[in-house]
Image (cartoon, grey):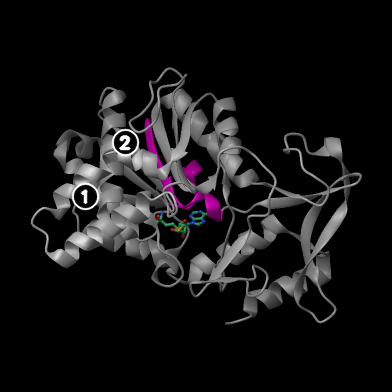
Amino acid sequence: MSGALRDLLAARIRAEGPLGLAEYMAAALGHPRHGYYATRDPLARDFTTAPEISQMFGELIGLWLVERWQALRSPPRVRLVELGPGRGTLMADALRAARLVPAFLEAVELDLVETSPVLRARQEAALAALAGPPPQWHDRLEQVPEGPLLLVANEFFDALPIRQFQRTPRGWAERRIGLAPDGRLAWGLGPDLPAGALPGLPPAELGEVVELCPAGERLAAEIGGRISEQGGAALILDYGYTASQPGDTLQALREGAPADPLEAPGEADVTAHVDFAALGRAATAAGARCHGPVGQGAFLEALGIGARAARLQQGAGEAQHRAIAEALARLTGPEQMGRLFKALALTAPEAPAPAGFPAPG
Ligand code: SAH
């Protein structure tokens, strides 16, 4: 198995020429036989996400979703959608917390957008244990039936393929992946594109790299369009930046350690930071209102994570007490996940700010 995807990509480069980074990422993560997500549960080995750190994360998001449903005047049917639910932990914790409002659970049609068969099985097990609304799986958001939408996506957008462009004296050139003389995958630059060929790129100095995530922008526009036409709200959490800016943020993790993103396609998680400003622009252009982004720490604190942690600590043993304090610090601490990770909400244009976000100014 090992090296199979590398060999396929090398053959494709020999036949067709260098690959764009977006094509490379799409194959490395999503190739149906050899892609990283298609073949394994990455959360077991390579990284930990907020819902896996503590149940508090999913619980607070569950209450956030219930509050948004009530803000829609409690429609009798609502599509509750999660993009890339991982092990199903966030959704299981959210639905458990939402038992406080049984009418919400009765209204929910649960739609999970997930391409990995390995993770679909994990999600099925996590949700079966809960006996909540039965999930339906989809490969793409497009396949989720119409209706008012409550959507959540945690660490999903960072896995969508990006393109990178480098500033040259004449304009821009796209970074591409070709073959070095020794047969390894290696970076190269495509032909020069005139500066005006890529409207919307942030200004950059000579040699600097800027990133675009066309798949992320398309998805943000699709979510924004649905919400503005049919009602609803979306909550997007991820690591990334508030304003579009230059910088190469491509990163790879292999067996939990930083790796060269080109070294072993399919064996490493390859991601990039999320440009929240670009997502916000795409969703706004599609008719939605954008709130935030705010830091994950500030967001969770506004939702009452401090009080929730204190409540869980009551009656806990010493070790458990300490573990809860540590989880709280990891999720909210400015040097941990509190600042780099951000929350962005999308609502209909007339909707007031959702919980955890400042009122629109
Ligand atoms: N939200 C989870 C998992 C994050 S990992 C958590 O917070 O723990 C990213 C998730 O998105 C995985 O479930 C992965 O299989 C899924 N995924 C990645 N790219 C996808 C795509 N293009 N379409 C659908 N699911 C995708």
Lateral position of residue 58 relative to residue 166, left or right: left
Front residue of 52/312: it is: 312
Is 103 placed above or below 136 here?
Answer: above
Q: Residue at x 77, y 34 (%)?
A: 199
Residue 105: image x %, image y %?
21, 40
Q: Residue at x 50, y 31 (%)?
A: 224
Residue 237: image x %, image y %?
44, 45
> Which of the marked residues, 2 or 1, is nearer the chain's N terminus?
2
Quadrant for the N terminus in the image: bottom right
Query: For residue 10, which quarter of the picture?
Result: bottom right
Cα–Cα span, label 2 and label 1 = 13 Å
Magenta stretch: give its range: 138-159
- Which amino acid, by three-letter code, is at mark 1? Ala
Q: Is residue 234 magenta?
A: no
**Proximity of marks 2 and 1: CB atoms separated by less than 8 Å:** no
SS at circle 1: helix
Q: Residue at x 10, y 53 (%)?
A: 314
Q: Is residue 140 magenta?
A: yes
- Kindly identify which residue carries mark 1: 309
Q: Residue at x 54, y 47 (%)?
A: 240
Residue 311: image x %, image y %?
15, 48
SS at circle 2: helix
Front residue of 24/250: it is: 250
> What label sits on residue 80 in the rendered view?
none
Residue 233: image x %, image y %?
40, 32
- Which amino acid, by three-letter code, is at mark 2? Ala
Front residue of 149/160: it is: 160
> What label sits on residue 302 in the rendered view?
2
In the rendered image, the residue lying farthest to the left is 315
Judge whether residue 354 can be spotted in this image: yes
Lateral position of residue 153 relative to residue 321, left or right: right
> Quick one: label 1, few (<14), some, or many (20+) residues within 10 Å?
some
